Image (cartoon, rainbow, N blue to C red):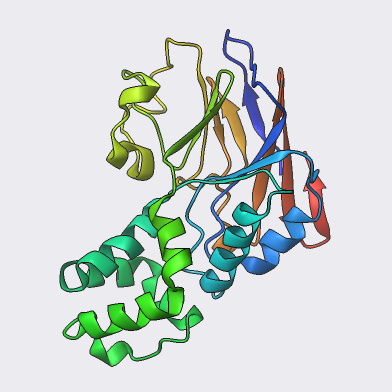
């Protein structure tokens, strides 16, 4: 694996050194392996998409929830489009069941001990009630409260993308979690760097002020974290023989 690096004119200048972890998609095994290699004194930002596709979505959510509640840890968990699909399913099961199930929702239901797929989509309300019960009030409230962005200095972390023509304060929710057609084509003019997941890359990349960290963990067994510091990006990736530093 050889990360691609092309540096823009603006200097990478976060206010602190921190990590950004790419899309996990239920891969608790890879998450635990990666976390064991991170400096516990640094902030760790997760880009979202903790659930679906992999087999341990419930366990991943509970671990991240525990991390967020631990005052000894500096943890930021952003909202991804897959968490948004789960929340929409709970709000309107009939309208949202098919889309979520086609995007890995079945694996998430199974991880919460729900296997009555014959009830979908006709009896989606009953499945949603079961899921709401299994998630529990505290974890559900935490999910509903996930932020879209996190910023340190001139570096912003988001799940999918930013609209390069808009300031950070006016970014549409849909763009943040689903993406924007001009995200990779137009460099931001405010000098702000962006770290994101959502779009799978073969290798982590640094191109035109955009750092991409979704290496398709659910399918490739490669979960990536970017270590971001002033003027420098390093990557840590899970592999057959532990964690590789790039």
- Classify 125 as above or below 198: below
Q: Position of residue 243 (x, y in %)?
A: 80, 53
Residue at figure coordinates x 36%, y 75% from the top left: 132
Figure label count: 0
Does residue 14 appear left or right of residue 143 in this picture? right
Residue at figure coordinates x 44%, y 80% from the top left: 134
Q: Position of residue 58 (x, y in %)?
A: 52, 72
For residue 34, which quarter of the picture?
A: bottom right
Q: Position of residue 93 (x, y in %)?
A: 21, 72
Q: Quadrant of the C terminus?
A: top right
Question: Can residue 34 be seen from the camera position used here?
Answer: yes
- Classify 207 as above or below 149: above
Residue at figure coordinates x 57%, y 67% from the top left: 62
Does residue 33 appear left or right of residue 63 in this picture? right
Q: Position of residue 1 (x, y in %)?
A: 71, 44
For residue 7, which quarter of the picture?
A: top right
Viewer-closest of 108 and 184: 108
Does residue 2 appear left or right of residue 212 in this picture? right
Question: Can residue 52 be seen from the camera position used here?
Answer: no
Residue at figure coordinates x 38%, y 30% from the top left: 162
């Amino acid at each position: 694996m050889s990360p691609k690096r092309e540096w823009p004119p603006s200097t990478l200048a976060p206010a602190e050194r921190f990590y950004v972890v790419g899309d996990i998609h239920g891969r608790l095994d890879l998450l635990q392996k990666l976390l064991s290699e991170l400096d516990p004194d640094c902030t760790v930002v997760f880009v979202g998409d903790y659930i679906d596709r992999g087999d341990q979505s419930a366990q991943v959510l509970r671990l991240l929830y525990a991390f967020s509640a631990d005052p000894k840890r500096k943890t930021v968990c952003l909202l991804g489009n897959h968490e948004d699909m789960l929340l929409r399913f709970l709000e309107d099961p009939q309208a949202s069941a098919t889309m979520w199930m086609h995007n890995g929702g079945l694996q998430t239901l199974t991880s919460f001990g729900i296997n009555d797929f014959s009830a979908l989509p006709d009896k989606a309300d009953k499945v949603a009630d079961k899921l709401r019960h299994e998630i529990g009030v505290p974890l559900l409230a935490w999910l509903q409260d996930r932020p879209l962005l996190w910023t340190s200095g001139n570096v912003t972390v988001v799940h999918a993308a930013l609209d390069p023509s808009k300031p950070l304060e006016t970014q549409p929710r849909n763009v943040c979690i689903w993406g924007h057609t001009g995200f990779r084509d137009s460099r931001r003019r405010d000098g702000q760097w962006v770290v994101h997941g959502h779009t799978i890359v073969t290798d982590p990349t640094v191109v035109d002020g955009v750092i991409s960290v979704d290496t398709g963990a659910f399918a490739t067994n490669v979960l990536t974290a970017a270590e971001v510091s002033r003027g420098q990006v390093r990557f840590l990736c899970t592999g057959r023989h532990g964690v590789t530093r790039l």
